[in-house]
Amino acid sequence: MEEELLSLSITKMTLNPLGFQQISDWGNPKYLTGEAREVISGGQIVGVSGAEGVVTSGTASYVNSDIKFYVCDDASNAVGVALNTVASGAALAVAVDGVFLLPCGGSVLAGRIVEVVPSTDTVQSIGSTSIPSALYAVGMVGNLFGRAYTAGASGGFAVINLGI
């Protein structure tokens, strides 16, 4: 009787006879090209800065150098990961969406939102450090950098999805 119930429940499940079938690999990462304000190495986490009013309402005046990248020193200004090493003033491609192996600077919990640990090119789960007062808890939401697909500890690596 028990075997019949097990067999019946299995036959009612909808399974792909071919097993797992991947329909998309998400393609290449989305990237943005700008200008490096300093020497930046591939894999470094970058932020943006620059003067006001460098773009107009039309694309005719836009050039890559309107966007200025620097090595990120502020978790709330982290925008992506440098794809190559460039000199100051050179064009730099920065991944702003995609899945990457990134170093952990604190605890990274699988499935959780991560932030950049400033000036270290590492990530940690938001809230993985102690919060000294409730004032800081509100600001931490602005530090969203991605979501962890695997867990990691300080000094290790984790799979991180940028641009969520």
Image (spheres, rainbow, N blue to C red):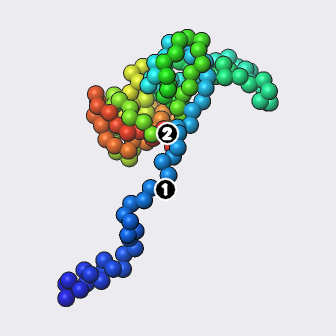
User: Could you tell whether 149 is left or right of 88 in the image?
Assistant: left
Give residue 74's position: percent from left, percent from top: 48, 23
Q: Could you classify mark 1 by the number of other residues whose Cα lies within 10 Å: few (under 14), some (14-19), or many (20 or more)? A: few
Sequence-first tag of 1 and 2: 1
Q: Which SS class for mark 2?
A: strand
Q: Give the CA separation, mark 1 to mark 2.
A: 17 Å
Q: Quadrant of residue 102?
A: top left
On screen, residue 91 above or below 32: above
Residue lying farthest front? 18
On screen, residue 75 above or below 18: above
Q: Which SS class for mark 1?
A: loop
User: Could you tell whether 37 is left or right of 162 in the image?
Assistant: right
Give residue 61's position: percent from left, percent from top: 78, 23
Tell me what residue is drawn at x 77 percent, y 30 percent. Answer: 59
**What amino acid does circle 1 point to?**
Ile
Q: Quadrant of residue 6?
A: bottom left
Give residue 138's position: percent from left, percent from top: 48, 37
User: Is residue 154 visible from the viewing direction of this image?
Assistant: yes
Tell me what residue is drawn at x 49 percent, y 22 percent. Answer: 84
Q: Which residue is mark 2?
A: 98
Tell me what residue is drawn at x 38 percent, y 65 percent. Answer: 18
User: Is residue 73 visible from the viewing direction of this image?
Assistant: no
Q: Which residue is mark 1?
A: 23
Give residue 104's position: percent from left, percent from top: 34, 31
Q: Could you classify mark 2 by the number of other residues whose Cα lies within 10 Å: few (under 14), some (14-19), or many (20 or more)? A: some
Q: Nearer the viewer, mark 1 or mark 2?
A: 1
**What amino acid does circle 2 point to?**
Gly
User: Could you tell whether 137 is left or right of 29 in the image?
Assistant: left
